[in-house]
Amino acid sequence: MFGPLAEPLRTQRLVLEPLTVHHADEMAEVLDDPRLHTHIGGEPLSLPDLRARYARLAEGPSPFHQEGWLNWIVRRARDGRAVGTVQATVTPTETWIAWIIGMPYQGFGFATEAAEALVTWLRAHNVQTIAAAVHPDNTPSESVARKLGMHPTQRTSGDETIWQFPL
């Protein structure tokens, strides 16, 4: 494993819990909306496919890869309900972050709050160069990136714009 290991994080309203396979059962419903995939591609996964994906994510990349996969389930602190995920892929040169909040939970600032907690935690672990790939039509994710203090760059990944913090 390259980089830090995921650990539980707390904010005023959220708990970020390191992802395990058992989270697939509750996350299948949160992620089962085709609108979530409009800008990130794909389609909602079946429960067996989501379990398999979470097993791969929890296992991490092969040991010889110089990257770490860090994934959290985002829960409301008041009732423990899962509302989405945040993730970071840590490499020697750059760390990529992403967030997904289920459709019924969007518009409440959960993505920004969870992503802020993630960025703060990464910086506390000496991760400095942080980027996010955001589709130019994904206005809510652009808003999250902007609220984090990120700026769009001239770089792209497929049809997504790379956002990062000023150097």
Image (cartoon, rainbow, N blue to C red):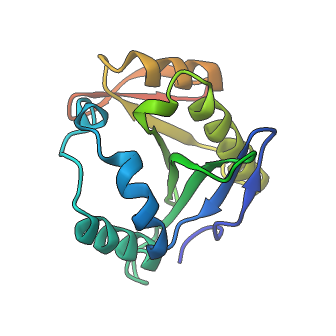
Position of 88 with respect to 47 (left or right) is right
Residue sitting at x 54%, y 25%: 145
* Residue 33 image position (x, y, % from top left): 28, 39
Q: Quadrant of the C terminus?
A: top right
Q: Residue at x 41, y 47 (%)?
A: 30
Q: Residue at 60% of width from left, 68% of height from top? A: 3
Question: Is 151 positioned to the left or the right of 124 in the image?
Answer: left
Instruction: Give the quarter of the image for residue 39.
Output: top left
Q: So how many labels did they put on this image?
A: 0
Q: Position of residue 54 (x, y in %)?
A: 39, 69
Q: Nearer the viewer, residue 108 or 11?
A: 108
Q: Please name whichever residue, 149 or 23, is drawn nearer the observer in this view of the structure.
A: 23
Residue 154, given in percent of the width and then of the height, sits at 36, 20
Q: Is residue 94 above or below residue 112?
A: below
Give the side of residue 31 with respect to residue 163, left or right: left
Asked if residue 118 shows in the view, the reply is yes
Residue 94 seen in the current view: no
Q: Nearer the viewer, residue 8 or 23?
A: 23
Q: Residue furthest bottom?
A: 63
Q: Where is residue 67 drawn, in percent x and y? A: 46, 67
* Residue displayed at 41% across by 65% down: 24
